[in-house]
């Protein structure tokens, strides 16, 4: 290895440490993380509600079976999204 390779490796290692150690600062950082987590949770719930409502309208007779089930599925998917987001953000 040459001296340029060593310098490049050290610079890359330093930048990777900085990226890994970077944390959002202050209130704005908390708002960004909280807003992202909220959207990750609420998005699948709303999508499930709309899809379930549409499926219930397609069926003969009035029922909320699809709506309730897809809202619950959306809540589960949203919770998994939030857990995966915080696990990847924690590293």
Image (spheres, grey):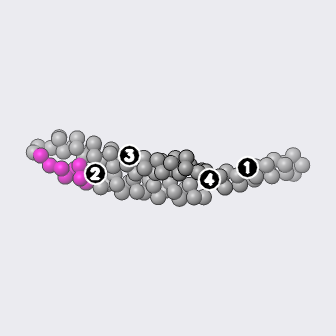
Q: Residues within 10 Å of mark 2 (few under 14, many from 20)?
A: many
Q: Which one is earlier in the sequence, the residue at label 2 or at label 1? A: 1
Q: Is residue 5 magenta?
A: no
Kindly state the secondary structure of the residue where label 2 is placed. Answer: helix
Q: Which one is earlier in the sequence, the residue at label 3 or at label 2? A: 3
User: What distance separates the C-alpha of mark 4 from that of mark 3?
Assistant: 25 Å
Q: Is residue 66 magenta?
A: yes
Q: Which one is earlier in the sequence, the residue at label 4 or at label 2? A: 4
For disc 3, the marked residue is 43
Q: Residues within 10 Å of mark 1 (few under 14, many from 20)?
A: few
User: What distance separates the C-alpha of mark 3 from that of mark 1?
Assistant: 34 Å
User: What distance separates the C-alpha of mark 4 from that of mark 2?
Assistant: 35 Å
Image point (45%, 55%), residue name: 82
Q: Which one is earlier in the sequence, the residue at label 4 or at label 3? A: 4
For disc 2, the marked residue is 70
User: What distance separates the C-alpha of mark 3 from that of mark 2?
Assistant: 12 Å
Image point (34%, 54%), residue name: 75
Kindly state the secondary structure of the residue where label 3 is placed. Answer: helix
Image point (60%, 58%), residue name: 91
User: What distance separates the C-alpha of mark 2 from that of mark 1?
Assistant: 43 Å
Q: Which one is earlier in the sequence, the residue at label 4 or at label 1? A: 1
The mark tally for this picture is 4
Across and down, in percent, residue 29 comes to: 56, 49
Across and down, in percent, residue 4 comes to: 87, 46
């Amino acid at each position: 290895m040459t001296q340029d390779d060593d310098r490049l490796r050290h610079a890359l290692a330093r930048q990777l440490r900085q990226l890994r150690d970077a944390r959002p600062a202050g209130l704005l950082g908390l708002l960004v993380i909280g807003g992202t987590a909220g959207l990750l949770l609420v998005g699948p719930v709303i999508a499930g509600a709309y899809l379930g409502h549409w499926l219930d309208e397609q069926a003969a007779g009035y029922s909320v079976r699809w709506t309730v089930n897809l809202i619950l599925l959306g809540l589960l998917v949203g919770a998994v999204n939030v857990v995966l987001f915080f696990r990847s953000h924690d590293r």
